[in-house]
Image (spheres, helix red, strand yellow):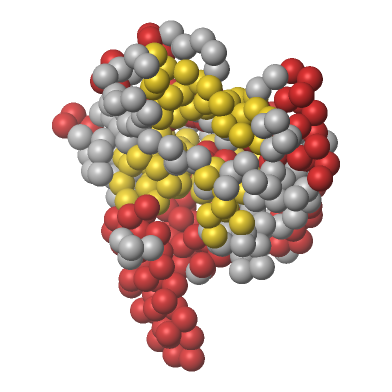
Amino acid sequence: MNAPVADRIRARIAQQGSIGIDDYMRLALGDGSGDGYYATRDPFGASGDFITAPEVSQLFGEIVGAWCAHMWAEMGRPSSVLLVEPGPGRGTLMADILRVARLVPGFLEAATVHLVETSPALRQRQRDTLAPLAAGIFWHESLSTLPDGPMLLVANEFFDALPLRQVQHRGGGWFERRISLSPQGALQWTLAPDPVAESDIPPALRGSPDGAILETAPEREAAAREVGARLARFGGCALIIDYGFSGPATGDTFQALKAHAYADPLADPGQADLTSHVDFTALAAAATAAGASAWGPISQAAFLSELGIAMRARKLMTARPDKAGEIELALARLVSPDQMGALFKVACLTAPNLGAPPPFPPRSGGESVPGGNAD
């Protein structure tokens, strides 16, 4: 157990009473103290706690990079564009995007790279990865400090790590799920004494069975709203890739990942990644309310396949026959429905003047609608 983090959480509860899941995630993952989960490790890859799609194969980043280049052209090839990635990990995805950008006349020269990252350790990894590929790289603590201008944003497994809240249906009311201390000092689940307002519960879910859990994530919606407002004002688009669903729906998706296995979220704060599934409908509603258009979600398999990942894989296998088996396995991991292909979804936010981005299906009249289109 990460003793400083666990001790700080216990002290907070002892002094102030139970805490919500959102506060627990902030304390465990990193609250500026310097000893949270992301501040003290590189969690990516085989030696870490999880592997993201860019770490599986360059195929993923190349397809995303080609998509970015296409959308830059659709935007009218602006001479200056922000290439933004929140939660960029080791910088692997951005590196693949930049390698593709070099092949598109004018794109790399127009782009400035902006990374939203709070971890000093990961910032250094990103610097090491990206310094040979881009002249200007800028780091930000939050989306709010990005400069003005048209934007291409790619958020791969970013929203799932933003804090969430849960409420549980009990005895005819909905009560916030919180974390308290047992008599022995262990972290445990508890319910707030007073119910939340019924108006906070989507009408379709108010008749849910006893014990049902509803998740909300105001910080995720705020981030989507901020991105949507920027797109409406300055132009551009945002690609969102994450595991999730089209809500509203009930279910407990709060989880911990440690050494590539699921773990008890309360067992080892500061030593495991904490995430939950993303409600794409809520993100789309927040972004469209701010003036953007929303598309999707579609499955990761559909996104990658319709943009030609199989053809790209065949070209790589022809060029590197010694790596053919490895490339084939990576392709399967990215698109197979029993691996990442169905679990992960892809959605897009665009400035209102842009049409349907590939490969998202156009709608009647070519307009997007709040909540996006279902897969």
Q: Which residue lies furthest to the bottom in this view?
A: 322
Residue with the most extreme front position: 183
The residue positioned 16% from the left and 32% from the top of the image is: 364
x then y, percent, for residue 72: 46, 45
Quadrant of the rendered image containing residue 286: top left
Residue lying furthest left: 364
Report the label total. Answer: 0
Res. 271 visible in picture: yes
Residue at the image point whose x is 46% and y is 62% from the top: 60
User: Residue 294: percent from the left, percent from the top?
Assistant: 35, 32
> Could you tell me if residue 284 is visible in this image?
no
Left or right of 254 in this view: 147: right
Residue closest to the eye, 273 or 305: 273
The residue sitting at 62% across, 41% down in the picture is: 266
> Can you give x and y, in whole percent of width and height, for residue 110 in the image?
59, 47
- Residue 321 placement, left or right of 310: right
The quarter in which the C terminus is drawn is top left
